[in-house]
Image: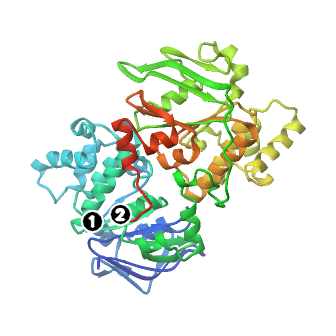
Amino acid sequence: MIVAVEDLRVSFGRTEVVHGVSLSIEPGECVAIVGESGSGKSVTARTLLGLAGPGASVRASAFQVAGRDALGFSPGDWRRVRGRFAGLVLQDALGSLDPLRTVGAEIAEALHDVVPRARRTDRVLELLEAVGVPEPARRARQRPHELSGGLRQRALIASAIAADPALLVADEPTTALDVTIQAQILRLLAERKTAGTALLLISHDLAVVASIADRILVMKDGRFVEEGPTARVLAAPAHDYTRALLGAVPSAASRNSYLTTGAPRARPSPDPSVALAGKGLTRSYGKRRVVDDVSFTLRHGETLGVVGESGSGKTTLARLALALLEPDGGEVTLGQGPWSRLRERERRPLRTSVQLISQNPLDSFDPRHTVGRLVAEPLRLPGPERRARVLDLLARVGLPAEIADRHPRELSGGQRQRVAIARALGPRPDVLVCDEPVSALDVSIQAQVLDLLADLQAEYGTAILFISHDLGVVHHVADRVLVMKDGRVVEEGGVEEVFTRPAHPYTQALVAAVPRLEPV
């Protein structure tokens, strides 16, 4: 047995956050812990590596790691365990990698006493190539801030597996990755498992779990509420919480239902009038053209999905649609009038017509301001009316009035995303541009946000440009879809047609790479 823990309890001060859980992992086995943020998944995983954190109190009736009693481990014992026996992959690669060192130096450190010095450079390149990093020699010379989120995550995984550990703990390892890179990483993890590595996978993505896990432990409020073989848990969940998690997963099957309740949802027919359109758009950075002759039409009441891998041009297209970037060629029009060709002083009165909901609203909020001030900012109303409008908007997105007096950092991720939606809806925009608006959220919170967007679109007839690398989410929300690759649209059409009968090889590869809820 690689790890065996019984009645594990973790406390911070007087607050116990993990309540008597037991688990074991054997060589060549993948055990997954699933649940929402705050359920205790990450604390449990980190405790198994001696990383519960400062001030943590860890108790257990049995705690065996690598055949030794870990309850008596010194800090030095834990460092030796993490150095050779166990590898850790966290979701936040930027916070995990040393910003002062190159990626190659970071990986090479893990090879100390494992690979001779003369072979380390070659081994670093082999590891980067194994995790799908293009141009590994060039990337090895770069520092973390010079890489995209996906490349950083792959570099972190390369560092974690460099010493060929017996145990690999992966905490949300694929959340930031495109579907094809995600599939590549999952294949890599599966190969490690086949070679005898024990895997502990922490995730809120049940489709990812289904693709690799042998057993699932479902965690809620610091306890395992259900556990068993993957096939049984996914096919016949016994606990209401597990059933709720499975029901909240967006897909083709959920298109005409509310994710949070399962009740039928009527999809309104889009208005034939055009809300936003782009024609022949191009945009370059230096010699690299990131948007190349892209055209689109978005109608009132319609959701247009834009999918593709990192670097395909999705976010640049969103910035062109918002007129935050000026196209090198082509034009964006708003309704029947100009948009991208306007001078900013002419565009400013129209800005409230096009609003953005981003992946990380915390980055776009002034941390000094209260939620009430943030939501009120785009409103052109006198004081008393403005306050009433703010409270109405918060109520519409399911937030209580007292939230208005709190600051963004005091809120959960789901609450912050709802504040971002309330702020965007305040001026009653014709167009919402959603750039990865739910990719960082737990599946149940994601379901609430997607249902909210659907209700608001039905009520206001808002046009939504929805950008995401999650094809399941796009299949659930979109009426039509654009598939982008290397700055160009390679396929477009109705979402059902494109996703069920993809014509372009790139679209076929994307669809084939989507993890399914069916266990392997």
Q: Residue at x 31, y 50 (%)?
A: 184
Q: Quadrant of residue 63?
A: bottom left
**Left-right relation of 410 to 223:** right
Q: Residue at x 37, y 35 (%)?
A: 504
- Nearer to us in this view, 519 or 21: 519
**Left-right relation of 355 to 40:** right
Which numbered disc, 2 or 1, marks the residue that appears first in the sequence? Answer: 1
Give the residue number, with chain letter if any, for mark 2. Answer: 212
User: Do the numbered discs 2 and 1 sit on residues whose CB atoms are within 8 Å?
Assistant: yes
Q: Is residue 97 above or below residue 40?
A: above
Give the residue number, with chain letter if any, for mark 1. Answer: 193
- Residue 98, image x and y in percent? 35, 47
Q: Quadrant of residue 30?
A: bottom left
Q: Secondary structure at mark 1?
A: helix
Image quarter (top left, top right, bottom left or bottom right) of the N terminus: bottom left
Circle 1: residue type: Lys
Extreme residue toward the bottom, this view: 61
Q: Is residue 323 at all visible to an observer of this figure?
A: no
Q: Is residue 271 at all visible to an observer of this figure?
A: yes
- Nearer to us in this view, 308 or 84: 308
Q: CA distance from mark 2 to mark 1?
A: 9 Å
Q: Residue at x 18, y 47 (%)?
A: 126
Q: Is residue 293 above or below residue 467?
A: above
Q: Quadrant of residue 16?
A: bottom right
- Nearer to us in this view, 416 or 99: 416
- Residue 163, image x and y in percent? 22, 60
